[in-house]
Amino acid sequence: MKPFIGKNQHILFDGTNIHTKSKKLPHSHKGYNTQEDYEPQINLLYAFAVKSKMPAYYRILPGNIREVSAFKLSIAEADLSDVVVIGDKGFGSQSNFDMLADAGLCYIVPLRRNNVLFDASRFKSGDKAVFDGYFLFNERPIWHYTLGEGVVVFLDEVLKCEEEARYLVNLGRELEGYSMEGFLEAQFRFGTIVLRSNVLVSPGELFGLYKVRGEIELLFDFLKNLLEQDRSYMSDQYSLEAWAFVNHVSLMLLYRVYDLLRTKELLNRFSVADFLTHLKYIFKVKINDVWHLSEVTQKTNDLLETLNLPIT
C-alpha cells in the first residue's frame, strides 16, 4: 500500500466499527461506538491521502481498542511523514489530546459548542470587531478568532441561518427537546465551529483541512452502504484479512469512479451507485464461439462518452 500513500502530503486518519458474530476472531470484542451499541465488533482504522483523494492504508484493530491509541504504530507501519489526525467531536477529551501530544502527532479536533473554552456571549453584540478577520471558503465568508490552547472559533453565517431555520421548523412540529427557551439559549452558537489543533497553519488552511474530513466519512459511507459491508461474517482471522483487503481494493476503484465523476462535474446528476447501475447490465454474449457486446442503452452510451471511458 505504500506506493499509494506517497510523500509530502497530508494523510487523514479515522476509524469505524464493523459488527461481527464470529466467536473465533481474536479481534472481536464488545466495544463502544457513537450509536451506543455494545455488540461484538472489530475496529477498522483508515488513512486517506488528501492530495490523491484516495484511501491509502487500513488496519484491523480489536473492537475494544480506541483508534487514538493505535495511531502511532499505524503511522510507523505505513512509513508516514506528514500526518494530521482529524477526529470527531467525541474525540475531544483531554486524555486523547495528551495521548496525541505524547505520540508527537498533529491533530485537528472539533470541540462541542458547550465546551468551556468557547464563550458564545461575545457574539451577542453582533459586532464583527470581536473577530480577528475572515476568509472565503467556497465563496462564502467565514469569520474567525483564536483562543488559547490552539483553539480557533469559526462562524459560518450561511450555516447559522440553516441551523436556526432547522431548529424553528422542529419547534413548530413540537418535536421533543425543542423549545423557545432552548432556541434563545443556543442562538449564538448556531453556525459556529470550534477547532482545537496543533497544526501551524492559517485559520483558512485549518478550516480547509478540517472540511476534507468529509472525504473519509464518504469512504465509510461507501464501505457500509454502497458495498454493504457494515458487518463481517468471516469465521477466522485469515478470511477477515482477505475480506478487508478485497474491500480496500473495491474502495480504491470506487474512488477512481467518484473522482472521474467529480472531474467531469457530473456529481449533481450521477452518484457512484448510479454509475455502477449503468454498467452492471452490460454483458458479453457468446454466439457461435464469438463474443459480442450486449445491447447498451443510449443513456449509458452518453454517460460513457462524456467520461471518455471505453468499455471494450
Image (cartoon, grey):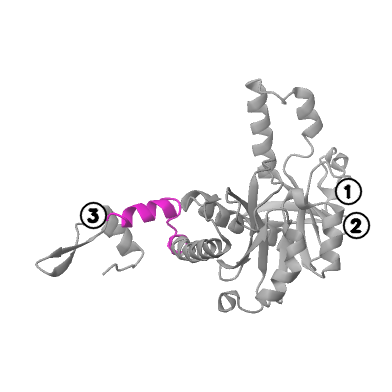
Mark 3 surroundings: few (<14), some (14-19) or many (≥20) residues within 10 A: few
- Mark found first going from the N terminus, 2 or 1: 1
Query: Residue shown at 45%/65% (left/top)?
Result: 253
Which residue lies under the disc numbered 2?
A: 148
Q: Residue 298 has which mark?
A: 3
Element at badge 1? Answer: loop
Query: Residue shown at 34%/62% (left/top)?
Result: 306
Q: Which residues are magenta?
A: 260-281
Element at badge 2? Answer: loop
Kindly check if marks 2 and 1 are in contact, taking CB atoms under 8 A apart as contact: yes
Query: Residue shown at 87%/39% (left/top)?
Result: 121
Position of residue 77 in the picture relative to residue 236 (left or right): right
Name the residue type under label 2. Answer: Gly
Query: In this view, which residue lies farthest toward the left?
Result: 288
Residue 114, image x, y percentages = 83, 41
Which residue lies under the disc numbered 1?
A: 117
Mark 2 surroundings: few (<14), some (14-19) or many (≥20) residues within 10 A: few
Tell me if residue 90 comes above or below residue 216 in the rendering.
Answer: above
Residue 132, image x, y percentages = 83, 56
Name the residue type under label 1. Answer: Leu
Is residue 203 shown to the viewer in this render? Answer: no
Q: Is residue 270 magenta?
A: yes
Position of residue 66 in the picture relative to residue 307 (left or right): right
User: Of 140 and 20, which appears nearest the observer?
Assistant: 20
Residue 55, image x, y percentages = 56, 66
Element at badge 3? Answer: helix
Residue 185 position by quadrant: top right
CA separation in Å, label 1 and label 3: 58 Å
Kindly check if marks 3 and 2 are in contact, taking CB atoms under 8 A apart as contact: no
